[in-house]
Amino acid sequence: MSQGDRAFLGHPRGLAYLLFTEAWERFSYYGMQSLLALDLVKHLLQPGQADGLLFFDAFRQLYGELDGQPLASAIVGTYFASVYVTPILGGLVADRLLGRHRTVLLGALTMMAGHFLMAVQAAFLPALGLLVLGSGLFKGNLASQIGALYGHDDPRRDGAFQLYYLGINIGLIAAPLVIGTLAETRGWHIGFAVAGVGMAIATIIYLVGREHLPADERRPRLQGRRAMTRQDLRGLLGIVLLIPLLAVALLPNNQIFNAYLIWGDAHLELTLGGLRVPTSWLITLDAGLGLAILAGLPFLYRLYARHRPEPGDLAKLTIGSLFATGGMLCLALGSALAGADGRTGLGWAIAFHLLNGIGFAHILPVSLALFTRAAPPCQAGLAIGLYYLVFFLGNVLVGWVGGFYARMPAPSFWLLHAGIAAGCGAIFLILTLRKAVFRSD
């Protein structure tokens, strides 16, 4: 794409369509995500409710003797993990068969069907399956289209992914306020149906803006593909080595959609003006603070860069892990200081979301920009699929660790997460000090 295209905030016009497509898709996804753990614990896993769910008896055998909250956390972790492993399949489909445009569109339609099907209680598992498949086709290929808007050395690339995460947070802020409130006050099926409407809007925006998006780079099979250079292989190796460490580093943040919601529902003072607010609004609190931090952080680093060099990618990952550690310590301390009724003040949750939001802003946009920069152009879709392996492994861990909540004191449970974040920060610091080789450093 030409560096002369600056129609949208100094970026190519196509970025606007991709951002709004992503924002509405995230509205649907996070609306559903903010409901899933609560729906399972408070509704579907209650006595007699699961009897009519298609295939549920066989599916439940995968989790052995788990029941109640541990089973809910395991199911949520499995679903969120599956959502992030299927982008590998989506990358291969786009790179070798359909191209990015048609793959993204197919994924959007599949997810829309899954969201609407979630409104039918008996179809809970088939609906989850459609959401997993559709997300795999959609997610990585949309992100790779953002990267394809820029030349390899275009300095606007990192800023584009900052805007990308701003779009994600806009959808995330709105989803619990609309979908969460409707679900907790009018019924779970209403919330899931509204998520389907959001996905329909995302599909329409993508179709309208299609002419402004980068052309697919898919080549006919007979022409073959450019052989990867030593530099390409080096970049892919760096990606693969970083995957497990990033997965563990994201575990504390991703617990927000699992055990944290269950803990907050039972132990936080969720009252405003004498009225109890929906538990899902905690997600809006997190997203609102995250949005402000993502918007302000680039300006802070510009001021910092006037006096000394801006930290590299690995240094920012270290900083992010340290802030995430502080956030988890807030939850541990708030739990330890809970009143006789077991409830603690909302201030502890606000402090947690603030510190965790700073950590998030240092980890996710940085790591995604790093992956797109290191990826060989002929394997862009696959490389982004590998990036989502981070979330697959992280959410597997979230589901497993989340099950500890039912048998650990809450302060110990959150101290465990603080220790995980601190350990990752120490490893990132070691890699930073040893000047580990990544193209961005």
Image (spheres, rainbow, N blue to C red):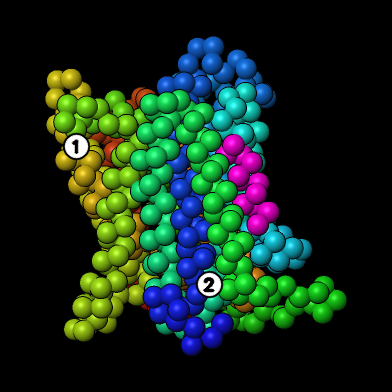
Query: Which residue position is annotated with label 1?
Result: 346
On the rendered structure, is 54 left or right of 292?
A: right
Q: Quadrant of the C terminus?
A: bottom left
Please tell me which residue is depicted at 54% across the width and 51% down the height of the picture: 201
Q: Give the range drawn in magenta.
A: 105-116
277 to 1, vertically: above or below: above
Query: Which is nearer the eye, 65 or 225?
Result: 225
On the rendered structure, is 138 left or right of 219?
A: left
Please tell me which residue is depicted at 58% across the width and 56% down the height of the picture: 204
Query: Which residue position is annotated with label 2?
Result: 14
Three-letter residue code for mark 2? Gly
Residue 323, percent across and down? 25, 56
Query: Which is nearer the eye, 395 or 128?
Result: 128
User: Counting other residues with Cα less than 10 Å from the Cα at mark 1, is it few (<14), some (14-19), or many (20 or more)?
Assistant: some
Please tell me which residue is depicted at 45% across the width and 81% down the height of the picture: 6
Three-letter residue code for mark 1? Leu
